């Protein structure tokens, strides 16, 4: 059988048998097939970056595999997008005596170092500010709060609650003169005011600073903790434009190895990713300008899965905060000052080191200070001053004090004696009514929160109304 060679005008050779004419095959069609290879042939052609020999194809494949590997590695995870872990300074305390603060004898260099650390880290710890006598008085006066809680729940079985006791407005209670003195007219209030006003360049020596909220807290062995968060409106009732400082006073020793204290994410108040954390927890930083219309509106518009649940909804942010956390080895009388916007969390007791027979209750007193220009959130609220008088919503703390009494007493430049004179009247006449209204509002909100949480959360823990507000 002889072979016939057919050449196209592009000089492409096509071979066919002489039987092709007998079978009806078209030499021109077959030539087109060879000029139009199959998809597989086209793919192989593209793959053959270095030639179409077997060796070249193998090298091309290896090159392609390497390129794909590099490409996948350049797709960064949410955690990798946070960048390198910043280096934080070791835990340390500033040694400042209360008398030195009261008599304006704090050395300029020491004060400058304190302010620099506060601006950088968002927190400073001071030892020696509160003396033993004051701590003893605070402990005795706080017994009434502990005993009230024990009477309400003798078995100490309450479900998951991060604090055994959380008493807002300790200064308004009977027989709590020491809380009143510490919060309004002490080395703690003076140092807090100095740190706050000197951290805001536009403020002056005469800028009013007020106590926004005071809370006596006690932590027991309940393993539940509130994850990293900034305080929500229930604990910090001011719109997000306002700066603020929290003075956290330890009434017990809290050794690191036993737990029971709290951890602070150093530098988180200024971190580039902080806004993502605000969204994940529904922080008050994202409060709508006009507030909320009602409970449903609040739950619909609030982002995230609740104040305490960052680890579940944004584990990469929780990991970064854990890597930059600072936990202080706390002694009785220590004071930790931290900015309103520093992320922090409670620390559970170490159940393996605390004997079963022990049932410790660690006490602490938290005092929040803000400028007189701080605005009480407008709209739907659980804030006591607003529940007492709805017109207080949207007012500054200075305006509330002038128009409706010392719900937020002034501590700087001086304590206002006229406010102190009517503090007792407010506590007797207005506060009880406001607290009744708050309890009713919390009952209204609770089932809505549970419904919302079941829809949003993946874990079995359910936050309380306190946490979500």
Image (tube, rainbow, N blue to C red):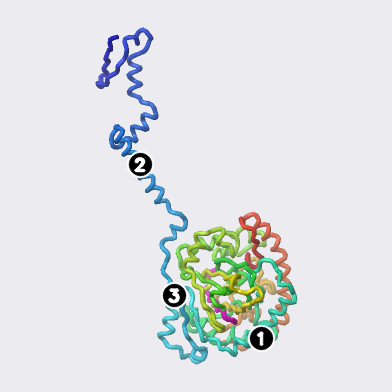
Q: Secondary structure at mark 2?
A: helix
Compute the Cα span from label 3 to label 1: 34 Å
| Region in magenta | 240-253
Q: Are marks 1 and 2 in contact (CB under 8 Å)?
A: no
Total labels: the figure holds: 3
Earlier residue among tags 3 and 2: 2
Quick check: 75 above or below 224?
A: above
Quick check: 112 above or below 31?
A: below
The residue identified by callout 1 is 140
The residue carrying pointer 2 sits among few (fewer than 14), some (14 to 19) or many (20 or more) residues within 10 Å by Cα, namely some
Circle number at residue 64: 2
Residue 236 at what x, y percent from top left? 59, 72
Tell which of 64 and 105 is nearer to you. 64
Q: Please report the residue visible at 73 percent of the width from the left and 68 percent of the height from the top.
A: 440
Q: Please report the residue visible at 55 percent of the width from the left and 67 percent of the height from the top.
A: 229
Compute the Cα span from label 3 to label 2: 47 Å
Earlier residue among tags 3 and 1: 3
Q: Secondary structure at mark 3?
A: loop
The residue carrying pointer 1 sits among few (fewer than 14), some (14 to 19) or many (20 or more) residues within 10 Å by Cα, namely some
Tell which of 354 and 411 is nearer to you. 354
Quadrant where the image shows the C terminus: bottom right
The image quarter containing residue 151 is bottom right
Circle number at residue 90: 3
Residue 54 at what x, y percent from top left? 31, 33
């Amino acid at each position: 059988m002889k072979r016939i060679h057919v050449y196209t005008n592009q000089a492409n050779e096509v071979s066919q048998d002489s039987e092709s004419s007998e079978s009806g095959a078209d030499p021109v069609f077959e030539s087109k097939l060879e000029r139009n290879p199959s998809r597989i042939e086209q793919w192989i052609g593209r793959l053959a970056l270095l030639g179409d020999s077997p060796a070249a194809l193998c090298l091309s494949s290896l090159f392609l595999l390497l390129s794909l590997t590099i490409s996948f590695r350049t797709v960064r995870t949410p955690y990798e997008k946070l960048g390198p872990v910043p280096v934080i300074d070791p835990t340390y305390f500033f040694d400042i005596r209360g008398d030195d603060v009261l008599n304006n004898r704090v050395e300029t260099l020491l004060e400058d170092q304190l302010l620099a650390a506060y601006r950088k880290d968002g927190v400073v710890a001071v030892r020696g500010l509160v003396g033993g006598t004051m701590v003893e008085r605070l402990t005795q006066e706080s017994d009434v709060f502990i005993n009230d809680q024990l009477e309400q729940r003798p078995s100490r079985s309450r479900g998951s609650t991060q604090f055994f006791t959380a008493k807002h407005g300790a200064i308004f209670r009977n027989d709590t003169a020491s809380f009143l003195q510490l919060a309004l007219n002490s080395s703690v209030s003076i140092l807090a005011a100095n740190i706050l006003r000197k951290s805001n360049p536009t403020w002056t020596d005469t800028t009013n600073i007020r106590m926004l909220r005071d809370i006596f807290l006690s932590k027991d062995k309940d393993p539940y903790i509130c994850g990293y968060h900034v305080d929500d409106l229930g604990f910090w009732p001011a719109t997000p434009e306002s700066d603020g400082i929290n003075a956290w006073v330890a009434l017990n020793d809290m050794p690191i190895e036993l737990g029971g204290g709290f951890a602070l994410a150093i530098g988180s108040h200024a971190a580039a990713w902080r806004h993502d954390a605000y969204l994940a927890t529904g922080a008050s930083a994202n409060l709508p300008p006009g507030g909320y219309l009602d409970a449903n509106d609040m739950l619909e518009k609030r982002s995230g899965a609740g104040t305490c649940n960052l680890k579940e909804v944004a584990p990469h942010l929780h990991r970064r905060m854990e890597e930059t956390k600072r936990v202080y080895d706390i002694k009785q009388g220590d004071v930790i000052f931290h900015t309103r916007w520093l992320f922090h969390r409670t620390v559970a007791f170490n159940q393996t080191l605390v004997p079963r027979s022990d049932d410790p209750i660690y006490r602490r007193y938290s005092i929040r200070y803000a400028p007189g220009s701080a605005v009480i959130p407008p709209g739907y609220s659980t804030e006591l001053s607003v529940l007492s008088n709805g017109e207080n919503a949207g007012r500054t703390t200075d305006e509330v004090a002038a128009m409706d009494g010392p719900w937020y007493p002034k501590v700087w430049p001086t304590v206002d004696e006229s406010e102190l004179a009517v503090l007792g009247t407010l506590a007797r006449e207005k506060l009880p009514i406001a607290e009744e209204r708050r309890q009713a509002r919390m009952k209204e909100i609770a089932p809505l929160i549970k419904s919302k949480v079941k829809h949003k959360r993946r874990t079995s823990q359910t936050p309380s109304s306190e946490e979500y507000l």
